[in-house]
Image (cartoon, coloured by chain):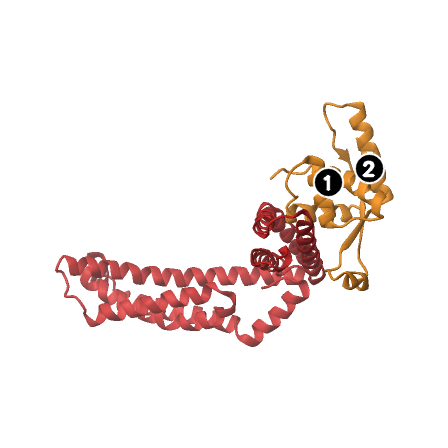
Amino acid sequence: MSVATSMPYHRAVRRVSLWCAWYTRGVDADAAANRRDELASDLHEQATWADAAGQSPQAVARSILGRAGRGALADLSWSHAQRRRVALADPIALRVRRVEGLAASLVLLAAIAVLGVGLYVLVRVAAGVATGLIRPGSGTSIAVLVFTALAACGVLLLARRKTRFIGALWMIAPSVGVIHYGLFQLYSLSATVGALMFSMPGWSLASDALIVGLVVYFAAAAIWWWPARAARAERVGARSGAKV
Amino acid sequence: MARRRPGTLFPLELSILDSGLSLQSAQGSFYGFALAKHLAGASDSSLTAHGTLYKSLARLVELGILDAAWEDAAIAEADGRPRRRLYTVTGEGERAHARAQAAVAAEPTTVPRPQIAPGGVSLA
C-alpha cells in the first residue's frame, strides 16, 4: 500500500487541514486560499517522496503531524499579522469589531454576575439545609436552582458569537428570577440582607430597579445583536475579511 | 520566540536563499516541499515545519527577495498532483545572498545578519 492511500497519512492530512482551516479563518480570502493550496501541495509531495524513499505510512504521518505542531506558533503569528493587516486597511470594520468585542464582553460579564449571585444563594441554601436553618426543597430554593441553571445556559449561549442574540434574550428570565427569588431566599439565610431589608426604606425599590436594569440591559443587547443588524455587521466584517 | 530587529533576516531565511539558489540553478525554480527537503538534507535534520517554512517564504516574497507564481494547473493535472507554488530568487535576493557569503568569508566565526535597506537588501 502506498503512503498516499494509507489511513495514517489520510488521518494526518485531515488533522493538518482542519488546523489550517482554523487558523486561516478571518484571513484575507486570497491569502487563505494560497496557504491552503500550498499546504495541500506540500502534503502530497511529502507522500510521493516518502513512497519513493520507502518510508512507512506511520512514519510519514508522524512527520507531517510533527511539522504541523512545530510550526503552529508561526502559523498563529502569520494569521495574526494577516488579520491585522486586513483590519488596518479598513478602519471602519476594525472599529465595528472593537465595539462588538466590548459589547459582548460587558454582556457576558453581567450574565456571569447573575450566575454568580445564583450560585452564591445556592451555596447559602446548601449550608442552611446542612445546619437545619431551613427545610430542604422549599419552593424558593427550587426557583433559585432553576433560574441559576437557566443563567448557566445563558452564559454558554452568550459565549458563542452565533448564539449571542438568543443568549441575551434568554438571560432576561434568569435575571428576574435569580435576583427576585435569590434576595427573598437570602432574607431568611443572611443576617446582612435581613438587616438591610428592615433598615433600608428603599430596599424594595433598589432590588426592583436592579431587576428592571438587568432586563433593559439584556433586552438592549438582544436588540444590538438582532439578526438583521448582525447580518449587516457580518457583511462589514466580511468586507474586511474579519469576523465580528 | 526571537524578536526581529527591523531590516534583518533570520538564519532560516538565509538558508532558504542558499537552498533556493541551488534548486533554481538546477530546475529553474523551486517549491515549498523541495525546499524543505533540501534544507533538511543540508543540515541533516527533520523537515522544516509547515508554519515556519511558509511564513518565511511569504516574508521573503514581501521583501522582494523571492518571486512567487502558481504553476500552470494543466501541468499539475497532467502529473496528477496539486499545483505547486513556484518560487524564484530575484536580483535583489541574489545580491543579498552574495553579500551574506562575502560577509561569512570575511568573518568565518560569526555570521552577521544582512540589513535590508528601504530600497532593497544590503549587508551592514
Tag 2 secondary structure: helix
Marks 2/1: CA–CA distance = 11 Å
Residue B13 image label? 1
Location of residue B16 with respect to A172 vertically, above or below: above
Q: Residue at x 21, y 72 (%)?
A: A139
Tag 1 secondary structure: helix
- Disc 1: CA contacts within 10 A as few (<14), some (14-19) or many (>=20): some
Q: Residue at x 62, y 37 (%)?
A: B2
Is B3 situated left or right of A101 in this image? right
Location of residue B10 with respect to A23 vertically, above or below: above
Q: Which residue is mark 2?
A: B96
- Residue A27, image x, y percentages: 65, 59
Which of the 4 image quarters holds residue B15? top right
Amino acid type, mark 1: Glu
Lower sequence index among marks 2 and 1: 1
Position of the C terminus of chain A, as image quadrant, is: bottom right
Q: Nearer the viewer, residue A233 or A10?
A: A10
Tag 1 subunit: B
Could you confirm whether marks 2 and 1 are on the same chain? yes
Location of residue A95 with respect to A62 vertically, above or below: below
In the rendered image of the structure, the colour used to display chain A is red
Q: Residue at x 60, y 69 (%)?
A: A233
Q: Nearer the viewer, residue A111 or A31?
A: A31
Which of the 4 image quarters holds residue A190? bottom left
Q: Which chain shows up in orange?
A: B
- Disc 2: CA contacts within 10 A as few (<14), some (14-19) or many (>=20): many
The reply to whether dot 2 and dot 1 touch (C-beta < 8 Å) is no
Tag 2 subunit: B
Amino acid type, mark 2: Ala
Q: Residue at x 78, y 27 (%)?
A: B104
Question: Seen from this angle, which residue lies furthest left?
Answer: A132
Query: Is residue A32 in view from this perspective?
Result: yes
